[in-house]
Amino acid sequence: MTTPFNLRRDPFGKLVLTNAEGEEFVGVTPVRAFPVQAPTRGISLVREGGKEVAWIDDIADVPADIAALVTNELDGREFMPEIQSIKSVSSFATPCTWTVKTDRGDTEFVLKGEEDIRRLGAYSLLIADSHGIHFLIRDMFGIDKGSRKILDRFL
């Protein structure tokens, strides 16, 4: 596995990309092209101002040290818990408090309005809470029956 660039952290913790021509770009940021549908594919490395300096087709195709740097940077910037089940809602009218089980533990959040639930493709939903945190339901048909019944009341 080789890449046409090298990636490292500088002493200040910023990512530094060195391309095949030897140019260095300090403070590059990885950005996912498809964060929900294909989180490990299509990752752009952009410099300040948003100009792309490198592209990763699939994180599995780059050396492990580069993959770890990119993954750690993305994990530090992106926070999107995945809802595994909906335990309860305080009301079927909004605003209401949802109690959910996520891949990061149990939590509660306030849904301000039904417009804060967005469809992503045929199966996925993105739910924004009152603080702007986004919760993902990757497959609304794959969660338990009780959770689907609650979702149906809001969709």
Image: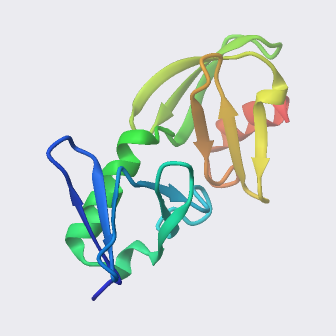
User: Can you give x and y, in whole percent of width and height, for residue 131 in the image?
Assistant: 59, 17
Q: Quadrant of the N terminus?
A: bottom left
Residue 103 visible at all: no
Determine the residue located farthest toward the bottom in the rendered image. Answer: 1
Kindly indicate the quadrant of the structure image that contains residue 2: bottom left
Tell me how many marks there are.
0
Residue 60, compared with residue 100, is above or below; it is below
* Residue positioned 82% across, 36% down in the render: 152
For the C terminus, give its image quadrant. top right
The residue lying at 66 percent from left, 36 percent from top is: 147
Foreground residue among 63 and 12: 12
* Nearer to the camera, 21 or 6: 21
Write the residue at 83% across / 25% down: 114
Residue 88 in view here: yes
Q: Residue 18: percent from the left, percent from the top?
A: 30, 70
Residue depicted at 46% across the width and 38% down the height: 79
Residue 34 appears in which quarter of the rendering? bottom right
**77 left or right of 6?**
right
Q: Is 2 above or below relative to 102?
A: below
In the image, taking residue 140 as reference, residue 50 lies left or right, namely left
Where 33 sits versus 14, above or below? Answer: below
